[in-house]
Amino acid sequence: MTSTEPFRLGSVALPVYLPSLLFATGEGAIIPIIPVAAVHLGASLALAGFIAALITVGQLIGDLPSGWIVARIGERNAMLWSATAALLGLVVALVAPNPFVLAVGVLLVGIATASFALARQAFMTSFVPRSYRARALSLLGGMFRAGYFLGPFLAAAVIGLAGSTQAAFWIDAIACFAAGAVLLALPDPTAVLAARRQAAIRSSAARPQVDALDQPAPPQRAGLFRTIREHRGVLARMGTNAALIGGLRSSRQVVLPLLAVSLHMPESSIALVIGVAGAIDFALFFSSGQIMDRFGRLWSALPSMIGLAIGHLALLATAGLHSAVIWFIAIAMFLSVANGIGSGILMTFGADLAPRHDPAPFLGAYRFTGDAGNAAAPLVIAGVTAVSSVAVAAGVIGVVGLVGAGLIARWVPRYIPRARSA
């Protein structure tokens, strides 16, 4: 593809996005059911919570090796093997006789999720031009958000009909099988776009104005550890940004239910508020991509981080008021808007920073930092809540968010210099 030839993702959009939607819908169906299944197998509430967290822990464990796997066997094969591994984990969960075997299955599903998500991000990094990148990645993020949003409703309906929580695991198994079938049945978008790129380069060989971003990919591959070593500076600084963004996002999902319980809100009201907030978050995913592509990465990342930080601080400031429930509802919606306008920012940052000819090892290391923030935030909240209160925990996270906003303002213009004018 030359600079004069428009990029057309639409012709491969179905095989690019549909497998991700199916995979995420299946995972979304089991996430709220895992602790229930653990309790049914005899786990305590603490152990059930730990088993539920193993999805995130599995993603964290899988991030680094998934970069190596995708680089070695390719995006499509990595996604097929990931779907197969997830199916194996679900079979283990379905036949688990005790909570510990269930934990093994859940951990395997989390590891498979890391490789599946990274493979599609690596494809986007290699083939989508910068001018379209944020919108394409925000749409990819929207597929995962849509799946996590729809999955619980699908699980609720199927469990109601089947009368068993185990039905949710069958939903995920069917979704993984369907994702694999789509990957096999539809054209491989990597092969399609690579062939187009080579044809365009050959046809424009006599023209010197070929876009450097769309040059043929160099064949050499650096490997995982060499990539980490060569990019240790950017991984340390932008990786810290990713961890803080991931932590603020993860915190929101933990703090809101805990604070709602502390305010003695009815369970049905809690579910309604968080459900509406999730719908607002999901509705904004493509707007984020538009902002990043038209105005620059900072115009999405910085307002999102500042908004998340202010929202957490507001939860602390309003927790003791007589109208605390009303404030809670308003702040929950505000946090969803703040999170929504940053949809896709971590994947976009990763794509902007990764070596275009061999992105997978870098993306694995970069995603590890973001997932580390996701995993650490609930632990921080639990620790602060244990010694003080959930409102104070929200305030602590808010302060961390303001620090993160400062780091974003400092490092993004340095490492992504087109962030202001992309």
Image (cartoon, helix red, strand yellow):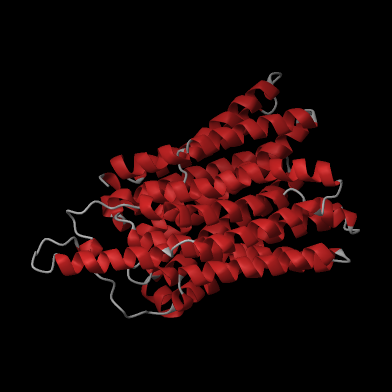
Instruction: From the viewer's side, name the closer residue of 184 and 167.
Output: 184
Q: Nearer the viewer, residue 299 or 114?
A: 114
Q: Quadrant of residue 416?
A: bottom left
Judged left or right of residue 344, residue 258 is: right
Seen at 41% across and 37% down, the residue is: 287
Residue 252 horizontal side relative to residue 264, left or right: left
Image position, residue 371 (x, y; %): 56, 59
Residue lying at 63% horizontally and 69% vertically, measured from the top left: 84
In the picture as drawn, the residue positioned furthest to the front comes out as: 185
Of residue 35 and residue 78, the one placed in the foreground of this image is: 78
Q: Left or right? Give the position of 418 relative to 205.
A: right
Task: Find residue 151 and report its horizontal and vertical position in percent.
Answer: 66, 46
> In the image, 6: left or right of 168?
left
For image coordinates 70% across by 49% down, the residue present is 29
Q: Quadrant of the N terminus?
A: bottom left
| Residue 310 seen in render | no
Percent position of residue 390, x then y:
70, 40
The tally of labels here is 0
Q: Position of residue 271 (x, y in %)?
A: 72, 33
User: Can you say whether 336 is above or below 95 in the image?
Assistant: above
Q: Quadrant of residue 42?
A: bottom right
Q: Residue at x 55, y 63 (%)?
A: 116
Residue lying farthest to the top in this orientation: 322
- Residue 219 visible to an observer of this rendering: yes
